């Protein structure tokens, strides 16, 4: 068994020059031995998991497309953070207190060694062993924040990037041509929050497309199937243009 199997699962068979879907927040699982000290209902909300992304990723898998999906809730360990970031073990999220995450340095190191490092080491080995034409960093965002309900979030999909905007510049007009409301560095900027892609894509010059799909659009199987086909189609076009 792969030594990252407790923190991530690989669906499909990665192909050289293919597409790898990576989703850091695909699970609301709280592993044994972790007590977050919260109402169990909170693990079904966006603060614990990117709603809908697992279904989208699973539906995208086919020959030439594989998926590497987190198996640990972002409330336990947020994989899309730098190792030294305070939010890696969040003490609050969208106005909710996470008392079980008020841990000392030893407790934080345990989270890093048990979850964070194996997740990223597994992804690094995979990308080194089977280079991809494109990485799709797949996330979803909530239509409204409990901590800021007046904030408008009308975008159906957001495209995020840091310094490398090669795929973004190709994808945005393609998505807009489908009649979608597309956010360029919205609902937040990839220059602020792009840790996984900074580490595994930008640092090595690997092309990637960072997306945030609005959660209400992929909350059920029908929406997930629709967006899976859309993203597979868009990513194929992006990959072909990148190769030109």
Image (tube, rainbow, N blue to C red):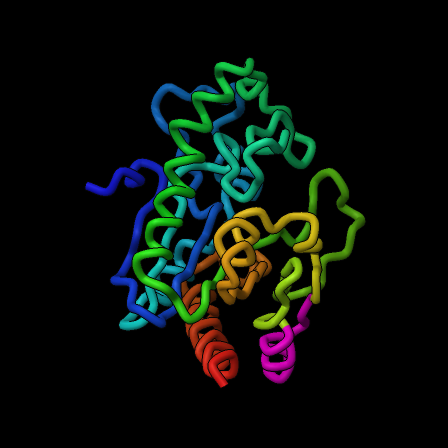
* Residue 5 found in image quarter: top left
- Tell which residue pokes out farthest to the front in this image: 204
Which residue does the image show at 64% across and 33% down from the upper left? Answer: 93
Foreground residue, 146 or 49? 49
Foreground residue, 68 or 142? 68
The image shows residue 53 at horizontal and vertical percentages of 46, 55
Quadrant where the N terminus lies?
top left
- Tell which residue pokes out farthest to the right in this image: 150
Q: Which residues are magenta?
A: 169-183
Which residue does the image show at 70% across and 59% down from the upper left? Answer: 186
Q: Is residue 111 above or below residue 174?
A: above
Q: Is residue 135 magenta?
A: no
The image shows residue 164 at horizontal and vertical percentages of 62, 64
Which residue does the image show at 37% across and 37% down from the upper left? Answer: 118
Which residue does the image show at 56% across and 58% down from the upper left? Answer: 202
Q: On the rendered structure, is 113 left or right of 6?
A: right
* Residue 211 found in image quarter: bottom right
Q: Is residue 171 magenta?
A: yes
The image shows residue 45 at horizontal and vertical percentages of 54, 41
Instruction: Please tell me how many numbered marks the rendered image carries.
Output: 0
The image shows residue 44 at horizontal and vertical percentages of 49, 39
Q: Is residue 131 above or below residue 100?
A: below
Q: On the rendered structure, is 69 left or right of 184?
A: left
């Amino acid at each position: 068994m792969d030594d990252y199997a407790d923190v991530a699962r690989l669906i499909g068979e990665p192909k050289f020059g293919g597409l790898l879907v990576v989703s850091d927040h695909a699970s609301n699982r709280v592993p044994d031995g972790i007590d977050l000290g919260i109402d169990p209902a909170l693990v079904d909300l966006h603060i614990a998991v990117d709603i809908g992304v697992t279904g989208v990723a699973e539906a995208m898998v086919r020959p030439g497309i594989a998926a590497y999906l987190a198996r640990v809730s972002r409330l336990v360990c947020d994989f899309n953070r730098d190792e030294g970031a305070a939010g890696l073990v969040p003490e609050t999220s969208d106005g909710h207190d996470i008392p079980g995450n008020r841990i000392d340095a030893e407790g934080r190191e345990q989270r890093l060694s048990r979850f964070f490092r194996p997740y990223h080491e597994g992804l690094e080995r995979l990308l080194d062993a089977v280079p991809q034409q494109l990485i799709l960093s797949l996330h979803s965002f909530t239509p409204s924040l409990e901590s800021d309900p007046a904030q408008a979030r009308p975008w159906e999909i957001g495209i995020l990037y840091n310094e490398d905007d090669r795929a973004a510049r190709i994808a945005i007009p393609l998505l807009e041509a489908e009649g979608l409301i597309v956010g360029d560095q919205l609902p937040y900027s990839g220059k602020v929050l792009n840790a996984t892609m900074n580490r595994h894509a930008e640092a090595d010059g690997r092309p990637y497309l960072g997306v945030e799909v609005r959660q209400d659009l992929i909350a059920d199987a029908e929406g997930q199937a629709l967006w899976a086909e859309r993203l597979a189609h868009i990513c194929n076009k992006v990959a072909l243009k990148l190769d030109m």
